């Protein structure tokens, strides 16, 4: 079974540019999550999709971040325009239906804003 | 106060020793608990879920004390390959959002 895959693995862009991260969850997992770890801090929740619907986006830092999951399969997270403080590792995770199910993580996208 | 607190580490331990990680959480309504392991520059990987009755998987034992809001992980007969950062994770009220500790780095020395 393929795991959660994320693309790209690394991205280096300049402040003010736009970047789009992609996540392909484990096949059949309705729940998809985005998390972020900025240097020196804990991993923080960004948002949660159930199929194509945003269930919880309370962790999104501001309106420069836009997440979509059209069709309920893969998801994208767009940052526009990118700022220096957006640098970090962005993880995607997925889980099957059911309360308390463990979440399985992708390798993450390491984003560096110059 | 952080929602999930762990020993700051790092732990430097000789191979074969027993290692204990401690974690406390602030939200008494939390229902699900996990230990994840993260190798350098890799994704977090689920090590084990933690149940009230305690659970064991080979050399690893996890325990939960709801009254004290305390979670532990014990590694027996530690191996070089156990070197990693161990993350205590609590599922929040929503039953989906994971709340992460900062992690404790473990270094096993030969």
Image: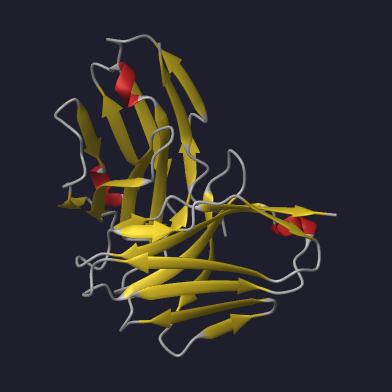
> Horizontally, is A21 left or right of A104 in the view?
left
For the residue pair A95 and B35, the one nearer the viewer reads as B35
- Relative to A59, residue B29 above or below: below
State the quadrant of the C terminus of chain A. Answer: top left
Q: Visible in this render: residue B44? A: yes
Residue drawn at (33%, 82%), measured in percent from left and top? B66
> Horizontally, is A11 left or right of A33 in the view?
right
Q: How many marks?
A: 0
- Relative to A95, residue B107 above or below: above
Residue drawn at (34%, 21%), measured in percent from left and top? A19
Identify the coloring: secondary structure
Q: Visible in this render: residue A27? A: no
State the quadrant of the N terminus of chain A. Answer: bottom right
The percent position of residue A78, horizontal first and vertical second, equals: 28, 28
Q: Quadrant of residue A101?
A: bottom left
Q: Quadrant of residue B13?
A: bottom right
Residue drawn at (45%, 90%), measured in percent from left and top? B53
Residue drawn at (27%, 24%), measured in percent from left and top? A79
The percent position of residue B87, horizontal first and vertical second, equals: 48, 57
Residue farthest to the bottom, as pictured: B53
The percent position of residue A87, horizontal first and vertical second, equals: 38, 25
- Relative to A97, residue B101 above or below: above
> Horizontally, is A11 left or right of A74 in the view?
right
- Relative to A2, residue B77 above or below: below
């Amino acid at each position: 079974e393929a795991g959660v895959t994320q693309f790209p693995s690394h991205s280096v862009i300049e402040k003010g540019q736009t970047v789009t991260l992609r996540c392909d969850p484990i096949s059949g997992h309705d729940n998809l999550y985005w998390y972020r770890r900025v240097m020196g801090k804990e991993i923080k929740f960004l948002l949660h999709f159930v199929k194509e619907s945003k269930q919880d986006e309370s962790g999104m830092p501001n309106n420069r971040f836009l997440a979509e999951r059209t069709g309920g399969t893969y998801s994208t997270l767009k940052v526009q325009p990118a700022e220096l403080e957006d640098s970090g590792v962005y993880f995607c995770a997925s889980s099957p239906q059911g309360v308390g199910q463990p979440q399985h993580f992708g390798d993450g996208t390491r984003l560096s804003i110059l | 106060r952080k929602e999930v607190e762990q020993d700051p580490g790092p732990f430097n331990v000789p191979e074969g020793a027993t290692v204990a990680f401690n974690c406390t959480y602030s939200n008494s309504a939390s229902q699900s608990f996990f230990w994840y392991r993260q190798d350098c520059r890799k994704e977090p990987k689920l090590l084990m879920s933690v149940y009230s009755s305690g659970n064991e998987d080979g050399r690893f034992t996890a325990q939960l004390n709801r009254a004290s809001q305390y979670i532990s992980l014990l590694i027996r007969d530690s191996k070089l390959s156990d070197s990693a950062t161990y993350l205590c994770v609590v599922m929040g009220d929503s039953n989906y959002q994971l709340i992460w500790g900062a992690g404790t780095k473990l270094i096993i020395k030969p």
